[in-house]
């Protein structure tokens, strides 16, 4: 099966301080999409389905092969959304776009401060475990924390 290399936008930071962004994903089979439906975690909470499905088709993430649901659960939300989009593209019947890993690129400078209009002051989200609706205050200055 053809595997598609990918680069996560944020990356998985492991306890040893390494950031892992590169991985491989393969196209799904019918069994990949059907089998997680019988998992008790999915039966209790259907939001768990994409996590199990992506763990089946993500064949490598940094040093992790196979990639377990626990590894994917530790990803930042932006990376998980990226994998979901990649999955949809890879399994849509369209040929995947060619990917060439960068050979060497200088690191982009990190801005000292982001403009106030870059992010809203608050963001509403839902806890994936208990379903509680949370409002996160993004206006707090965490530089001194």
Image (cartoon, rainbow, N blue to C red):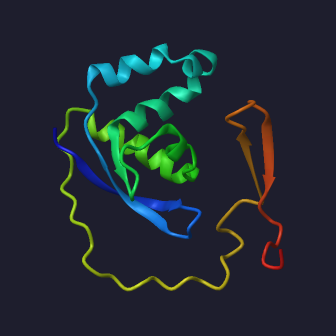
Decide: is 145 above or below 51.
below
Quarter assignment of residue 8: bottom left
Going by the image, does 119 lie left or right of 42?
A: right
Quadrant assignment for the N terminus: top left
49 versus 59 height, above or below? above
Residue lying at 36% horizontally and 48% vertically, measured from the top left: 65
Question: Residue 23, position in %: x, y?
Answer: 34, 54
Identity of the residue drawn at 57% across and 17% down = 40
Q: Quadrant of the C terminus?
A: bottom right
Image coords of residue 58 (percent x, y)? 35, 43
* Near-viewer residue (16 or 48): 16
Residue 62 lies left or right of residue 113; in this view the side is left
Number of marks in the rendered image? 0
Residue 89, by quadrant, is top left
Q: What percent of the width, then of the height, locates residue 93? A: 20, 32
Q: Is 60 displayed left or right of 17 in the figure?
A: left
Seen at 41% across and 37% down, the residue is 54
Q: Position of residue 5 (x, y in %)?
A: 27, 54
In the drawing, does residue 103 fall left or right of residue 16?
left
């Amino acid at each position: 099966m053809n595997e598609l290399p990918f680069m996560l936008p944020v990356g998985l930071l492991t306890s040893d301080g390494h950031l892992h962004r590169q991985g491989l994903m393969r196209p799904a089979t019918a069994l990949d999409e059907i089998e997680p439906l019988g998992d008790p975690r999915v039966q209790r909470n259907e939001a768990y389905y994409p996590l199990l499905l992506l763990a089946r088709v993500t064949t490598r993430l940094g040093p992790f092969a196979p990639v377990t649901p626990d590894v994917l659960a530790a990803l930042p939300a932006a990376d998980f959304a990226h994998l979901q989009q990649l999955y949809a593209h890879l399994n849509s019947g369209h040929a995947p776009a060619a990917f060439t890993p960068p050979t060497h690129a200088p690191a982009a400078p990190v801005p000292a401060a982001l403009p106030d209009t870059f992010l809203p002051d608050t963001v509403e989200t839902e806890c994936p475990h208990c379903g509680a609706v949370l409002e996160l205050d993004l206006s707090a200055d965490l530089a001194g924390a």
